[in-house]
Image: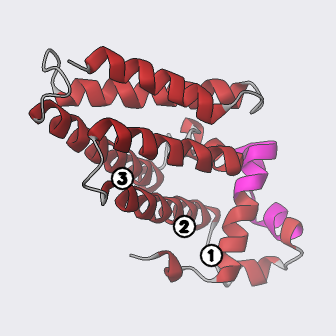
Amino acid sequence: MKKNQFTDRQIEIMEAATLRIDKFGIQELTIKNLSGDLNLSEAALYRHFKSKNEILLGLLTYFILEMNERIDAIIADKEKQPSELLKKIFTSQLSTFAQKPAIVSVIFSEGIFQFNKELSDKVSVMMALMQKNINALIVRGQNDGVYGKLLGADPITTIIMGSMRMVVLKWKLSGNKSNLVNDGKKVLNGLLKMIEK
């Protein structure tokens, strides 16, 4: 699956949907409101997406594809140590959130996914992708003797992901006023110090 599976118009619609969710909440994301935001007729919008649900699925798919490309490019550098790669992955992810804060409202909105299996499955794919990459770097660091083995790679991965999620949530609740990338770096550096040998 590639990002170019989406047309420019579909990307425009997904970006407008993200902004609407960020500004007004998921309950205000309707085809009528969205078509108004884009100065499109509802019929024209339906030519690109069959439903609000399809827009949300597209948006999550697009973000996952983009995220996968970024992470693959970082991990491809086999010369770098696991800690450097972890820092690059999270700097990349947090920078993306800081540049596109509206996407955080979608990804971190449990209310959107609570009763929709397709959407919750898509968020699970995103989490699994991140988890797989972080876990592989932790295992590599443990095998190289850089990280201790007091805890296994799975719990360390969960601690890192949970901590970074908390950093993003605090930033979102502050109205995006704090420096997300710097706050994330501080937390990640502290966590890495805790697991280093």
SS for tag 2? helix
Q: Is residue 122 left or right of residue 30?
A: left
What segment carries the magenta color? 18-36
Q: Which mark, residue 60?
A: none
Find residue 41 and report its horizontal and vertical position in percent. Answer: 84, 79
* Residue, disc 2: 58
Q: Residues within 10 Å of mark 2 (few under 14, many from 20)?
A: many
Mark 1 or mark 2, which has the lower sequence index?
1
Q: Nearer the viewer, mark 3 or mark 1?
A: 3
Location of the C terminus by quadrant is top left
* Residue, disc 3: 125
Mark 1–mark 2 contact, CB under 8 Å? Answer: yes
> What is the CA distance from the residue labelled 3 to the residue labelled 1?
22 Å
Mark 3–mark 1 contact, CB under 8 Å? Answer: no
* Residue, disc 1: 49
Q: Is residue 78 left or right of residue 100?
A: left
